[in-house]
Amino acid sequence: MYHAPLKELGFVLHQLIDDGQLEGLPGLAEYSPEFADSVLQEAAKFAEQVLDPINVLGDQEGAKWTPDGVRMPPAFKEAYRQFVAGGWPQLRATQEYGGQGAPTVLGTAVEELWGSANLAFKLCPMLTQAVIEAIHRCGTSRQKDLYLPRLIRGEWTGTMNLTEPQAGSDLGAIRMRAIPEGDSFRLHGQKIFITYGEHDYTPNIIHMVLARIEGAPAGIKGISMFIVPRVLVGADGSLGEPNDVRCVSIEHKLGIHSSPTCVLSYGEKAGAVGYLVGEPNRGLEYMFIMMNAARLSVGLEGYALSERAYQHALAYARERVQGRPAQATAPVRDKPLPIVFHADIKRMLLAMKSQTEAARAVALYGALQLDLGRYHPDAATRAAAQARGDLLIPIIKAWATEMGVQSASLGVQVHGGMGFIEETGAAQYYRDVRITTIYEGTTGIQANDLVGRKVGRDGGTAMGALIADMLEELRREAPSDSAGDRSAALAAVELLKEATAKVLEFTGRGPEHVQAIAVPYLMLSGYAIGAWLMARAQSQAAGRIDEDRGFYSGKLQTTRFFLQHALHEVRAQAAIVTGGGGAVVEADPDLF
Amino acid sequence: MYHAPLKELGFVLHQLIDDGQLEGLPGLAEYSPEFADSVLQEAAKFAEQVLDPINVLGDQEGAKWTPDGVRMPPAFKEAYRQFVAGGWPQLRATQEYGGQGAPTVLGTAVEELWGSANLAFKLCPMLTQAVIEAIHRCGTSRQKDLYLPRLIRGEWTGTMNLTEPQAGSDLGAIRMRAIPEGDSFRLHGQKIFITYGEHDYTPNIIHMVLARIEGAPAGIKGISMFIVPRVLVGADGSLGEPNDVRCVSIEHKLGIHSSPTCVLSYGEKAGAVGYLVGEPNRGLEYMFIMMNAARLSVGLEGYALSERAYQHALAYARERVQGRPAQATAPVRDKPLPIVFHADIKRMLLAMKSQTEAARAVALYGALQLDLGRYHPDAATRAAAQARGDLLIPIIKAWATEMGVQSASLGVQVHGGMGFIEETGAAQYYRDVRITTIYEGTTGIQANDLVGRKVGRDGGTAMGALIADMLEELRREAPSDSAGDRSAALAAVELLKEATAKVLEFTGRGPEHVQAIAVPYLMLSGYAIGAWLMARAQSQAAGRIDEDRGFYSGKLQTTRFFLQHALHEVRAQAAIVTGGGGAVVEADPDLF
């Protein structure tokens, strides 16, 4: 049974990253920490009472393809109905079109609960939110008026259509054709891996489709974005004839079985009617608006599943009696005890919990930067915060999901043999989480984005500013650092600084050199930034221990464990980065 | 399509670990490197042509429980028939009862091929071999005469029955009762997680069952071992009435779907007839004979699946065209190329391949020690080799399987989105391999065995002797060490030495302290010992490069990558070990 970690979320939001900074900012007039708490309490109820109970059922039943369309498990349809009735699709959407305009940081906190309780369900509103964002930022006012209110009310959902069989990470290879016809276009081609590309939650689905207008330049500079509704929409928003788009099949996947992953065929008849978004040939740029939001949201899936796997493993470890632990903390030494008292079980649980907390801290800090980048009245502050948020997105996406995979695997391990039995439930997280390091850009793609567009392009300015802030804070005297934990965080950030200098140096040698060490660099960035925030959390917990001894003592345990381990991880990865990727660059694929 | 790595196996056996040492030893008169090669060639054919083609089918169909028994996929029955016809069950079995008496090192090399091609299939002969070993070493001559020839011919198969619902890692909690009745016993109780506890390959199955004779002492000192045939056997070996044992159900598992994991109910009627093996109350000791053999064999499953996942990922990376690699080694720069030329794909493939090679080297080295421990004419050499083999078993079991899990996960990642689609095949390895760090003792159990029974009990003698040998070899001048790879291996082994001293120090402080750092210590042991053998492989490859430029250049690539990365891993884990497990020991489970 899932329990939303409300106390932890309150701690991170209000104390660790200080969401009070957003209070009273123009455009966020209604936001306050108290408002966030009340939203999170309602979200917790929905996650615990509606989404969590159908998670296993969703895994077992899955979405089903039929010639008449994709059929979702009825319990999922009902959950979606309640999701809409509860007003959840509105949370982050613009107030101009009926949304509540909540900041990204609150949206991120809430989405964690959806992700923990039911990842397959969570993907539908995530993509709809991305479509809302894209139409709001790039669409015509007619498009906004027509689509946004219905998407924001959750009456319709949205999808991103990028991938084609020959065009995965390389979007320049997209072939889908768009032929002008009056004010609109006719689209022909096939898209694959379309999450929630078909379902029976809602009578319409708004596909955001990348395609080439006839005669457009080759490569990424010839790609445009189109709105292609599943069912054609009249000027008054009424539904007309079905559009010429069909779900040919859905994938049989390792996990997230109730998230239909569709092959969509456009234009088998006269061509699917599509409406250009923004200017021609700027589709990729617009798609990245959606992508960035989605990448942050996938990053949170990493720790959302880690949290869920942790709770599940902890419950088992407290219940399963096996062996006489050697552990000094065991209350009784002479009879079998729950395995939570075994040293190695504790080690695994601490690893899972501390990784979850560190990733959550970095993700919510990053989300807050995006809000400051959007709403802060001072232009320079806005620009710096936006740059910092953009810098953090690939780190959050890749580092948090890689740790999520590790954590779900540890969750299986804590269960021993029972972990391998599907009915236990631990295996589902191990299967579900495995997509998170892949979709919306693999870990390798995120790492190349980090070393290329985020660090290389500005010569390390945004990363340098973050490192300077972290060093300044960590060099200040801590209330107590008897175990040297704060020094460990400081050492980790200093290694990040050295590694960043190396990345910039390698950038000059050519992309192959920097790409060969990009993933190790990204991972150490995550650990170092995580260590900075965990050191801050440790100081705050030490200072407030009398306010809530249970919670803050727990926080001291996880921060201590994380800080002692993170530095070793950072050292190992930094050694790989500074050593250069020679063993990779010079390796000849013919000799594999 | 799986290709048995025959050249690599020949290199490891004949050059790297020098199996020539076994030639002419008493009891191994027929063994020679040439003999090993001819066996491996035949095994390769069987693995590639019979086992590999049905691996996916086995995953999809799985074993099926019916009221009349467990039904295997017909293709698996046929494969088993061919396995027996080919004489494979005889390979490692004692010549006294019709086996071929091949050494453990050859058996281990051959079993890798079964594991890579079809893990679910491989488990049946693995357990039968363990039963053969146990009856041969502990049974009466009557038991040997009756059971061994049929087990060795593969006419019957065998199982290990340890686990009960309340007795997993803690075998002292076993409750199954054995009531004396004349020369035999009547057994009552339930066993779970019994691999191949029921199937329709053969007309009989010999269960080796742990149970308590009425009135036996509590805990592990009151456990005896029994032979319980599924079908009762006449004095002439003829099959009689079914015994009172029934497969109640089989588990629905994450992977290895065609390996039936059974719940066996004994004695629902008059009691299952069982025959005591050896002396009463020494069952656990006998079971460990089986367990040790099985642990080595599970260890090889880790790199067997890593090899399979690597081959699969490499084939995809060579075929999948996507993007313009930045890689200098790419033959053409101006058009899309296979992703094998992307730096990060190369990095992942090198990680998979080098881990596989290092684990294989350590496992075959360990297996060779067991053979020297059994067959060497000099008693002192035998004792030292046996101690070294015993020391290495938990390291091979846990380190190789943990790396197998990592490697299979990387295999999914190399495939990108396709990796998450079941039809691609990469996901099966990710699912199948997940059991290997659990069964036959979890990684935590192996680590406790290592720090307790293997290092703590002899005060570090066996480990110290291995470290001394490794240091002596690594300090000798290498033909060339321009990249410092040999120095890296030396540094890794020196860190293992320091960490071992710490383990002995912590042993004095109480088991909780040493168990808290046991897994990090085990992992660094694996990397350090792997680094030693990979450094040796590098020297040999450099010296022989003209003999086979393709193979040895590839070996130089993987050894270089491994040595550069292993040291960083060892450093990280050694820092955790020497830092002590304070953050774990002092963590209070109530605060989780």
Image (cartoon, coloured by chain):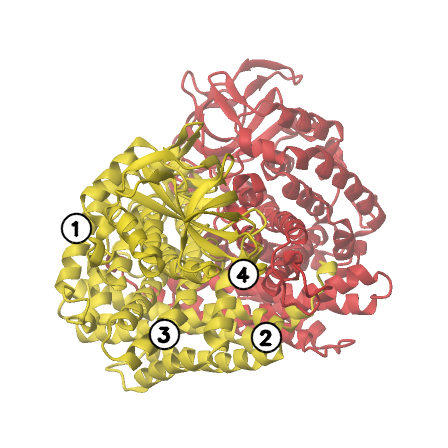
Chain colours: A yellow, B red
Circle 3: residue type: Arg
Where disc 4 sits, the SS reads helix
Mark 4 to mark 1: distance in Å? Answer: 43 Å
Residue in front for this viewpoint, B415 or B305? B415
Give the image location of residue A314, x and y in percent. 31, 51
Circle 2: residue type: Glu
Mark 2 to mark 1: distance in Å? Answer: 56 Å
Residue in front for this viewpoint, B505 or B202? B202
State which quadrant residue A68 falls in.
top left
Q: Residue tagged by mark 1?
A: A42
Side of B512 relative to A551 (left or right): right
Which image quarter is the C terminus of chain B in?
bottom left
Q: Residue tagged by mark 4?
A: A220
Q: Is residue B190 above or below residue A258?
A: above
Where disc 3 sits, the SS reads helix
Label 2 packing within 10 angstroms: few (<14), some (14-19), many (20+): some
* Residue B478 seen in this snapshot: yes
Circle 1: residue type: Glu
Mark 3 to mark 4: distance in Å? Answer: 26 Å
* Disc nearest the viewer among 1 and 3: 3
Mark 1 to mark 3: distance in Å? Answer: 31 Å
Q: Residue tagged by mark 3?
A: A388
- Marked residue chain, label 3: A
Give the image location of residue A299, x and y in percent. 38, 59
Q: Is residue B587 above or below residue A438?
A: below
| Residue for point 74% across, 52% down | B9
- Marked residue chain, label 2: B
Q: Residue tagged by mark 2?
A: B494
